[in-house]
Image (cartoon, grey):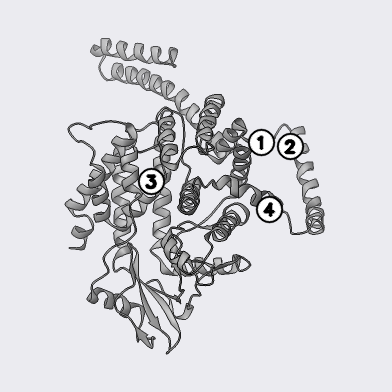
Amino acid sequence: MEILRLYSPVRVWRVFGVLLTLYLLIRKREKFLFLSPLSPEKLLRYITLLGASFIKLAQVLATRNDFFPPPYLAKLKMLHDELPPMDAKMMQKVFDRAYDTDPFYRFEKDPIASASIGQVHVAWMDETTKVAVKLRRDGIEKQVKADIRILTSFNALFRPLFSHYTKHSIEAVINEFSSMILKEVSLNQERANLQKFYETYADMDVRFPTAYESLSCDDALVMSFEEGFRFDDAKALKAHNIDIIPLIRTLVVFYTEQMLVRGFFHADPHPGNLLVSKEGRLILLDFGMVKRVPNDIRIAIIELIKAANEQDYERYVSASKRMGTVAYDAPTAELAEFTERMFAIFNNDALDSASMQDLAFEVLEQTRNLPFKLPQEAIYILRVSAIIEGLGTTYIENFNGIKDILPILQDNIPRALGAKESIVETIIDEFKTLPLDVRAFRNAIFRISEENLSVELSKPQLEVLEKSLRESLSPVLTGIVLILSAIFVLMYDQTLENYALVLFGAGVLRLLFRKG
């Protein structure tokens, strides 16, 4: 019975409809056989009905302006992770599984928030200590795993229809999304993320909830209750005389520190997860979606931001290649021209946000065949950047994140590149590693003298090499298979000599004309 619920024909059909629509939009096709894409409204409704997995996936896809026309993007960006709460019986089942006996002085059974993974209740440890209790939805882990299987199966069906770069971008999105949502359904993982954040960013002017470890498990997470106004509630902030401009700067400084200096960041800073206390202090909630930034990606982003600020478009493209968002063999000059046009739009102070978006979409439309990619490491970085940009433009028209980030980044570049707080510490550290550096240099010289020096290639270079080898070897293998088939046909029945000759000739031609 549970299998029928997880893999019901109606659910599978809706998943097919959503993925078919995404395929047709990305490929710019009106139909596949007799099937048309869902309308923007129907796509939004299907995704909402499919629940947690597909809401999260759509929120990630909504960052890809190059994939979707504006009407679809507008609908995808309307998606909020809000679902009806569990009924009383199911909620009690989860509560009883988490606790043998009720540990709370008082527990409110009606939740104050309900999302795809779980719902939040207010409780008290005693007469004065208020806490937030997050309960995981019953059966959500099984549902998510079933959804990933369905998604992976349909992706295998559509995969051959995409170009090389689009195929890898879509797979990166699905792989990263699958990995992230499986972690997100574990409240133990969220508690660990919260604790790590608390330790890593204790020196920042941002507040986090405090977890009650002894009362938490995979089904329940108990935290201190944090009071505040939503970051985008301009009316409430104004009524309490809270100046939003310093808060935006605090947010930009905090995310620069997270993504570019320490490489450990909260990947879901939407307005519901960002509160402002009555004292005007930033509060960050919900630590289910937390990511690490690999060092090579961090360094590439730093160079990307510097190149953008200096309007050095070729260096910007070069950094994009190292980051993996542009194919390593992409034409630099053509991409630099595209980048220059995009920056001319976003740096034009005479344009409002709507005009900027319209012009940007026109430019993107002309570049759909350029080899843009979306590596797994970049997915949530781009998503967070888009959310922060959106929060900034709520209060500051033509808010430009790059212009604000650069001075902060320049002050922190030594730390971002691994230097210590003082020059003395840095010099001491360098001297400590000097014997290792000398030894590594000596080994390199020895390998050269022995003609045994290996070359290390970056991931993008390896991808280009792999693609090139595949394109070169494919006709060779086809030719060999055709020639071997001709030999086997002759061995099997010599009266089939004419067929064997055709196969042999085709094989020879394939080997001779490999470019075809």
Q: Could you tell me the amino acid type at mark 3? A: Leu
Q: In what element is the residue under mark 1?
A: loop
Q: CA distance from mark 2 to mark 4?
A: 38 Å
Q: Could you tell me the amino acid type at mark 2? A: Arg
Q: Measured from the top left, where is residue 433 in percent x and y?
A: 78, 53
Q: CA distance from mark 1 to mark 3?
A: 39 Å
In the rendered view of the protein, which quadrant contains the N terminus? bottom left
Q: Are marks 3 and 2 in contact (CB under 8 Å)?
A: no
Q: Which mark is residue 454?
A: 1
Labels 2 and 1: the sequence-earlier one: 2
Q: Is residue 326 above or below residue 280?
A: above
* Residue 31 visible somewhere in the drawing: yes
Q: Nearer the viewer, residue 236 or 184?
A: 236
Q: Which residue is mark 3?
A: 61
Name the mark nearer the viewer: 2 or 4: 4
Q: Residues within 10 Å of mark 1 (few under 14, many from 20)?
A: few
Q: Which residue is mark 2?
A: 447
Labels 3 and 2: the sequence-earlier one: 3
Q: Nearer the viewer, residue 280 or 432?
A: 280
Q: Residues within 10 Å of mark 4 (few under 14, many from 20)?
A: some
